[in-house]
Image: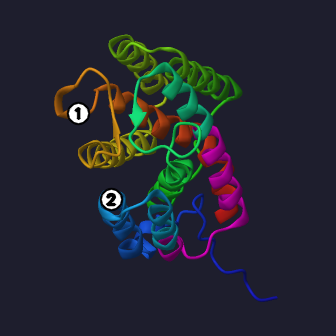
């Protein structure tokens, strides 16, 4: 019988992150998306241009990734709607639920892009560790959906993020958290200085410090709770 080809999924010894295979397309997604948000006029035109850039960069999207993308968009649309009601930020030209139409699709892009860039095997965790991650993630989501004061939000979410990093600090945990913070900085400052959204109280640079805990927490909990669902699709 012919031998099977070597495994190349994220859990295999020969696995290479997606960005090593598609580096240019994936890296160009970020400046292209930033430029579209800043310079393309009109919310519908922004969305159309963003979708074209994303499709060109991702190319083949697996069914599991498509489901993941859709669920992320639904979840963060709800989170954004709750945060907007709390008044912790506001969009300049909303279309639906206080958001421009393109925002409904952004978080799916952020996380699918991060998965394609970083990839990696699912973390090895006991059932207790999984429950700890879920509890912290739910507390995290509750904080952003219920706390209106920016300083309180920063303190609470920083404590939750530090607790998460104390429990989960493998190299890829730190990579996901760090990459999402860098991604968040690029889009937050671009969005604020392009006049797309704003934060109350005129924070230094226009963006409150809790953006670090928001994006870092999303990265950490993505590695712990979502990558285990995505990684098997690549094996």
**Residue position for label 2:** 34
Q: Is residue 6 magenta?
A: no
10 Å crowding of disc 2: few (<14), some (14-19), many (20+): some
Q: Which residue ends up furthest to the left in the rendered image? A: 204
Q: In the displayed structure, does residue 133 sit left or right of residue 1?
A: left
Q: Regarding mark 2 in the picture, which secondary structure is present there?
A: helix
Q: In the displayed structure, does residue 100 sit left or right of residue 35?
A: right
Q: Position of residue 35 (x, y in %)?
A: 30, 63
Q: Coloured how?
A: rainbow
Magenta segment, principal secondary structure? helix
10 Å crowding of disc 1: few (<14), some (14-19), many (20+): some
Residue 133 lies in quadrant: top right
**Residue position for label 1:** 206
Q: Position of residue 45 (x, y in %)?
A: 46, 66
Residue 23 lies in quadrant: bottom left
User: Considering the image in quadrants, where does the N terminus appear?
Assistant: bottom right
Q: Is residue 18 above or below residue 225?
A: below
For image coordinates 18% across by 34% down, the residue present is 205
Q: Is residue 130 above or below residue 201?
A: below
For image coordinates 66% across by 81% down, the residue present is 5
For image coordinates 44% across by 62% down, the residue present is 46
Tell me where the magenta segment starts and ends, as one range.
55-76
Q: Position of residue 30 (x, y in %)?
A: 35, 61
Res 235 seen here: no
User: Considering the image in quadrants, where does the C terminus appear?
Assistant: bottom right
Q: In the displayed structure, does residue 20 sit left or right of residue 83?
A: left
Q: Regarding mark 1 in the picture, which secondary structure is present there?
A: helix
Q: Is residue 66 magenta?
A: yes
Res 112 seen here: yes
């Amino acid at each position: 019988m012919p031998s099977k080809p070597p495994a190349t999924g994220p859990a295999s010894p020969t696995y290479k992150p997606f960005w090593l295979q598609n580096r240019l397309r994936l890296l160009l997604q970020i400046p292209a998306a930033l430029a579209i948000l800043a310079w393309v006029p009109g919310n519908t035109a922004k969305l159309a241009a963003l979708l074209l850039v994303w499709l060109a960069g991702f190319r083949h999207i697996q069914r599991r990734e498509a489901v993941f993308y859709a669920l992320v968009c639904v979840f963060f649309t709800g989170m954004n709607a709750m945060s907007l009601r709390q008044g912790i930020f506001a969009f300049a030209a909303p279309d639906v639920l206080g958001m421009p139409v393109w925002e409904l699709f952004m978080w799916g892009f952020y996380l699918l892009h991060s998965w394609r860039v970083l990839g990696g095997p699912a973390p090895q965790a006991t059932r207790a560790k999984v429950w700890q991650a879920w509890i912290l993630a739910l507390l995290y989501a509750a904080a952003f959906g219920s706390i209106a004061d920016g300083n309180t939000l920063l303190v609470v979410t920083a404590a939750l993020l530090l607790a998460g990093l104390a429990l989960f600090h493998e190299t890829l945990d730190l990579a996901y958290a760090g990459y999402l913070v860098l991604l968040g900085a690029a889009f937050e400052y671009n969005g604020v200085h392009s006049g797309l959204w704003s934060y109350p109280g005129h924070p230094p640079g226009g963006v409150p410090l809790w953006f670090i805990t928001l994006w870092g927490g999303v990265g950490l909990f993505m590695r712990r709770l979502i990558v285990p669902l995505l990684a098997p699709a690549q094996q």
